[in-house]
Amino acid sequence: MPELISSKMDRAAEVEALFVKPAFEVTVEDAKMDPKTRLFMYRDAAACKMVLDDAQSADTFQNINQWAAGWAMADIVYQSPSSASCFDGASVSTANVSKYTVSNHLSAIVPKIMEGIFYEDPIFLLRPRPSVSPDILRAKTAIFSLQLDEMKFEEEAEALLDQMGLLGTCIAKWGWTTRTEKRRTYVRKADKAKISDPLTGKIKEYDTPESDQFEEDFIEIDIAQPWLKFTDIRTVLVASNCRRGDIRKAKWVIYRDYASYEDLDNLRDTQGYTIPDEDVLKYMFSQPLSVDPDNITMTIPEQMRGYIQHAIPRNYKASADPLQNGMEVLERWDKDKVIVVLCYNGHCIVIRNEANPYQVIPFYSANWRNIPDSFYGQGIGQLIGNEQIIEQSITNMSLDLLAYGLQPTAVRKKGFNVLTQDTPWELGGIIDVDDDVDKSYKFLEMPPVPAAAFSFLSQAKSDAAATSGSNELVGQGSSLAGPRATGMRSGTGAAGVIQANASRLDGPSSRFIRQILQPWLYQMDELNNRFLPSKVLRRVLGEEVGPNATGTLFSVDHLDYRKAVIDFEVLAGSKLGAKKEMIQALPLIIQLLNNPTFMDNVNQQGYTLDGVAIFRNFSDGAGYKFTQNFLVKMTPDQLQRHQANSPAAMQQAKMQGAQQSQLRQFQQEMQLEDQKQLGKAGAEVVRQTTQHALNSEEVNGEPGNTGFGSDNQI
């Protein structure tokens, strides 16, 4: 027992040694220039003071601003909770029908914007410089597509658009992560049986009961990739002097989060972080935590539990497991430095104080509607929330008047036998009166619901639709505000709807693309060029693109990949036509390729066509993935058969056959000529021999004139 107490005292002393007492004030004497980065860095005490004071001032500004921005009202009208109320002096409930105008408009608009942004896959188009090869372009497209899927960008974008539409502003946080991940794989318990084929002599593999069995195995994979996530605007404290609706214009930003033990432990191997030892960190989480309250904008729903739906505040204890509860972390970013302070029971521990590795503030933001001289914007909750309140009030008051007609109030003449209690209504019941029934008893006439109320109700719906733009976007010939239609059934009406959509919805979607999506694509490219290891690049390309034309895994030189300069074109919103226009141009391109005049002109200019590249561009335009390789390299046998059956090879074989036929004919003619000459020579020899014989001494009795020593010799 004493040893346990001593161990706890040692842990407490180690934790206390980590505490940093904030400076009384931040002065220029606390700043020192880093010789490597040439940036001014502050010592831990001054850095801690800077984070705490900036967080406090930004908290105060946000708490004041949220009332002007209508965040609380937007939250209430979005959920439109019911509340019970009764008529004055009675126990009868009044009408309380909820209206969901804001929710309906958001549920109609946000999916349409999402559909526009993610209409194509991938959602971007790369425009390379002339020096960039097609393989580099293909590699970058594959890398970006995979990384966007890994970070679940579509889910994060939907969360951003939801809050942007409701509260008027959305904020995204980004960064780079490097880790080692264990992945499950499967291996055979035994190899397949190998048997030689007696006919071909080749070795063939056959499954066996042992080879059919498998076991799990784990391999370590290096993960290095960018990430982007949605952050609630009430958890991000932006410098109060930011006058533009773009967080990149802010001087500094503080992100408040509540980290668990696992969250902090995962940062242990991250460059720049100084995380307490594992035993010390566990001891800190084992002690009772007096966590400072969250920003009031996040804790307002706490007072309305059972009224509107929200998770408990982040500073609350959410689990019996102490390691899963949160500890406040303040993360301050500016373009030069990053400071991270861990708040523990009223004390501060600086776990990061270094130069900003990104040289920019790692946040993006966009507004639904910008407000001049303000960072925060206007959302649908603020813009049409009053229209929902008017619609709900008129509807409930009209229902109250109609309720009087369905359950009317009766009046009767006072008599000698006046009842001392109310007479209940009952089916088939009888009420006694003293005088003439028509004179002593009747129903009280109530005023009808004014017709102007329904007209005003229709006008409120129409104003809400016109303000948000959902009427023109999703009406499709029927209106959200009564009989008014959108005109989408005619060409003229469709043009008007497109114009209305451009003026209302293209603003928010264009700001989202311009301030979040497109900058993030360029930032991803820069992060990959700076931090992506070459071996991870090769592995990802091999897995995503697959084998190339030679049958080997697709790969590019990593220096060419990093040095390539490209431009991004987002295929969303008003830019959706880029890829469609490419597809529409394909028939014209095919006609040109089949035009002999055009091809002759191309060849005369010294050019030829790359059929593989053309087919790949056609398949990419049609939306096929990188792994669907329609074109594969021929095997040697296939190549030999193709070469033998090609027109050129067949023409050459035909020419060779003709030449051989001519050669055989020539040889035959030569043989005939030789035989003819040989016959002539033989005949001449016979003739001369016969003539010699006739001129001999035995025949004529005189010596001949031929022979050795004579003038005529043969």
Image: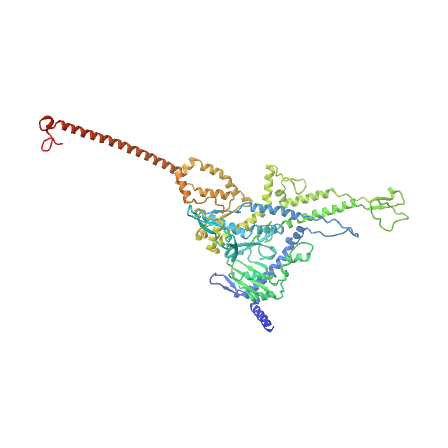
Residue 137 x %, y %: 47, 48
Which sits in the foreground, 335 or 430? 430
Which sits in the foreground, 67 or 82? 82
Residue 607 visible in the snapshot: no
Quadrant of the drawing holding the C terminus: top left
Seen in the image, is 264 located left or right of residue 560? right
Most extreme residue toward the front is 698
Residue drawn 52% across the image and 51% down it: 146
Q: Please determine whether, in this image, residue 115 is positioned above or below residue 188.
A: above
Residue 65 x %, y %: 63, 55
Which sits in the foreground, 708 or 169? 708
Residue drawn 66% across the image and 40% down it: 484
Residue 378 x %, y %: 62, 50
Name the image colouring. Answer: rainbow
Residue 348 position by quadrant: bottom right
Q: Please determine whether, in this image, residue 681 is positioned above or below residue 9.
A: above
Residue 188 x %, y %: 50, 54
Q: In this figure, what is the number of numbered marks?
A: 0
Residue 466 visible in the snapshot: yes
Quadrant of the drawing holding the N terminus: bottom right
